[in-house]
Image (cartoon, grey):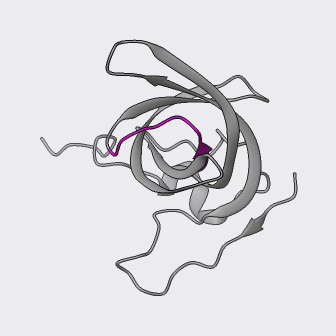
């Protein structure tokens, strides 16, 4: 797979938790609608990192809505939350999604950036609790 790293933003308020990679990856997105109907859409992720990515969607979604992302190549699936919805262009919107738990292996990007290593991806839930 050919991919290129996007420059990490110098402004700490805009910095991502893991390096973003520009890579077109075929995915399926499953969305449960308000009427309990499930919509399935095959599409692409355009920018990915260990915490989520930017995907193209024709289906309407809202910020904080949960979706399931399926990697078409590996059939692995992860639950994600919509973090932002961009302007629609040619019937699709760029939608930011964040995995419920980081997964650096989900996208199948190799070699992985150093900050994608599992030990650097500790989430508050996964951190040891003081007793």
Name the residue located 68 percent from the left edge and 62 percent from the top edge.
21
Above or below, 25 relative to 17: above
From the top left corner, tell me how far across and down residue 102 is, in percent: 48, 44
Q: Nearer the viewer, residue 130 or 45?
A: 45
The magenta-colored residue range is 54-63
In the rendered view of the protein, which quadrant contains the C terminus?
top left
* Residue furthest to the top: 36
Asked if residue 63 lies left or right of residue 119, the reply is left
Q: Position of residue 71 (x, y in %)?
A: 69, 31
Furthest residue in direction right, as rendered: 1
Residue placed farthest to the left in the image?
131
Q: Main secondary structure of the magenta part?
A: loop
The residue that appears at 48% across and 15% down in the rendered structure is: 38
Of residue 64 and residue 126, the one placed in the foreground of this image is 64
| Most foreground residue, 39 or 50 | 39
**With 68 as the anchor, is 6 left or right in this view?**
right
Residue 20 picture location, percent across and down: 61, 64
């Amino acid at each position: 797979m050919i991919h290129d790293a996007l420059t990490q933003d110098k402004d700490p308020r805009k910095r991502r938790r893991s390096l973003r990679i520009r890579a077109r990856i075929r995915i399926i997105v499953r969305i449960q609608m308000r009427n309990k109907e499930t919509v399935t859409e095959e599409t692409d992720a355009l920018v990915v990192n260990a915490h989520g990515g930017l995907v193209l969607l024709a289906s309407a979604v809202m910020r904080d809505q949960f979706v399931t992302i399926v990697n078409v190549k590996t059939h692995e699936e992860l639950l994600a939350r919509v973090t932002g919805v961009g302007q629609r262009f040619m019937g699709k919107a760029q939608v930011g999604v964040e995995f419920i738990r980081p997964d650096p292996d989900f996208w199948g990007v190799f070699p992985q950036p150093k900050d994608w290593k599992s030990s650097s991806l500790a989430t508050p839930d996964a951190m040891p609790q003081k007793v």
